Image: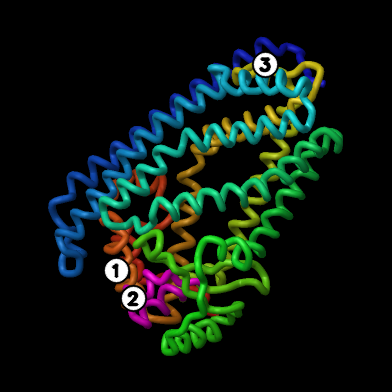
Amino acid sequence: MLAVTNAPNLALNLTYAFAAMLLVNLLLKFWLLSRQIRHVAYHRYEVPSAFSNIVTLTSHQKAADYTISKLRLGLVDLALGAAVLLGWTLLGGLSALNQFLLGWFGASGLGQQLALLGAFVLINSAIDLPLGLYQTFVLEARFGFNKTTPKLWLIDLVKSSMIGMAIGMPVAFLILWLMGAAGAQWWVWAWGAWVGLNLLLMWLFPTFIAPMFNRFTPLEDQALRETVTRLMTQCGFASKGLFVMDGSKRSAHGNAYFTGFGSAKRVVFFDTLLAKLSTKEVAAVLAHELGHFNHRHIRQRMLFLFALSLAGFALLGSLASHFWFYAGLGVQPNLGSPNDGLAVLLFMLTVPVVSFFITPLLSWMSRRHEFQADAYAVAHTSGEDLAAALLKLYDDNASTLTPDPIYARFYYSHPPASERLAHLSHPPATNAS
């Protein structure tokens, strides 16, 4: 049953608070994006002195133009996202969808609530589709990065949708069932199920999901294989194998990463990365990734995410039983039947508005980890090789060398190029064990 004590006043207060926070959120994002656009445009005409002997003016201007184009698209996405959020909440879109499905199903049971979640995801995906297509086939293509075809894009969409349904629907069913059957402490059980799913996906992704989208072949370059194997042995890291992914069939961007969990860990190199870097430079990039494992950054981030999600489930468990939570966000709840699907969707829609304000803290933590991983790489390979690799990646990925300092402090998960290369020249002490 919903608690309705003092509901009108609390609902009105929530409406005002949400509207104010959304406005502040929107204005702050717009200000940050505008600062970045102006700063990058202002420094477009001259390569920073620290890079003048390495980066050409043509490459620097391409990076500036690419960055500005993405940011302008981000402004459109920002306005659209705010309008859609208002439409779902205070303007009554989610409430109307719920009432429509109630008329269709006749009652708010598990079937109706699952249909509500599914319809919401379908409509939101359709709204996001035009901007996604524009980014892939216009913006990325304009700067020479897009390699995917309409056919491949459609195949990816069908595959990802099928996987999303195969994973998402059972999870949604389990959480909704727990909300209705596990009593007041349902959120503890739901959080446990969510944690278990994430751990399972970390094990399943490299072996079963990723191969559905890309081809993974064993690393054949014998010299590189020997160098990488020797480095991993030196660092005490064991993996299931070294693989090359055909990333070039979708994008010209390069990367390398570790994936998997426990005995399923594997090292993956994009073929685009191997085409651009020397053996020593690839080893330096890999040493950086090994630094994350040495410092247990992956585990720290995972535990932090689990702790944050526990707090989120607890908050949802408290809010879901109050009438004002729904009414204050523009939704007419079901008075005599479950509202669990509505509660989940409202929570998913509103939490990002609040959590956005801790972005600078999360970004700072991530940049700190990157500096530590760089220092570890320098201790096991060569700082010059890592710097050369990073410069090639900045150049090939058209990453701006002149970000706005405030924007970078707020958003950047990796240090700006100038700071990162300066640290490579004088790395702090690190535990190289």
Q: Residue beneath label 2, please?
A: 277
Which residue does the image show at 20% across and 60% down from the upper left?
A: 59
Q: Is residue 389 above or below residue 40?
A: below
- Of residue 145 and residue 16, the one placed in the foreground of this image is 145
Query: Callout 2: few (<14), some (14-19), or many (20+) C-alpha neighbours within 10 Å?
Result: some
Image quarter (top left, top right, bottom left or bottom right) of the C terminus:
bottom right
Whole-angstrom CA distance, mark 3 to mark 2, is: 58 Å
Does the magenta portion include 392?
A: no
Tell me the quarter of the picture where residue 236 sits. Answer: bottom right
Q: Which sits earlier in the primary sequence, circle 3 or circle 2?
A: 2
Q: Residue beneath label 1, please?
A: 392
Question: In the rendered view, how is the structure colored?
Answer: rainbow
Q: Amino acid at mark 2?
A: Leu
Whole-angstrom CA distance, mark 1 to mark 3, is: 55 Å
Residue 326 visible in the shown view: no
Which residue does the image show at 75% across and 24% down from the upper left?
A: 105
Tell me the quarter of the picture where residue 380 sits. Answer: bottom left
Q: Is residue 40 above or below residue 369?
A: above
Give the structural element (helix, strand or loop) at label 3.
loop
Residue 202 lies left or right of residue 352; in this view the side is right
Give the structural element (helix, strand or loop) at label 1.
helix
Q: Is residue 152 above or below residue 265?
A: above
Where residue 369 appears, as percent x and y from the top left, is 49, 61
Query: Callout 1: few (<14), some (14-19), or many (20+) C-alpha neighbours within 10 Å?
Result: some
* Marker disc for residue 332: 3
Q: Which sits earlier in the primary sequence, circle 2 or circle 1?
A: 2
Q: Which residues are magenta?
A: 268-286
Q: Which sits earlier in the primary sequence, circle 1 or circle 3?
A: 3
Where residue 419 appears, as percent x and y from the top left, is 32, 60
Q: Amino acid at mark 1?
A: Lys
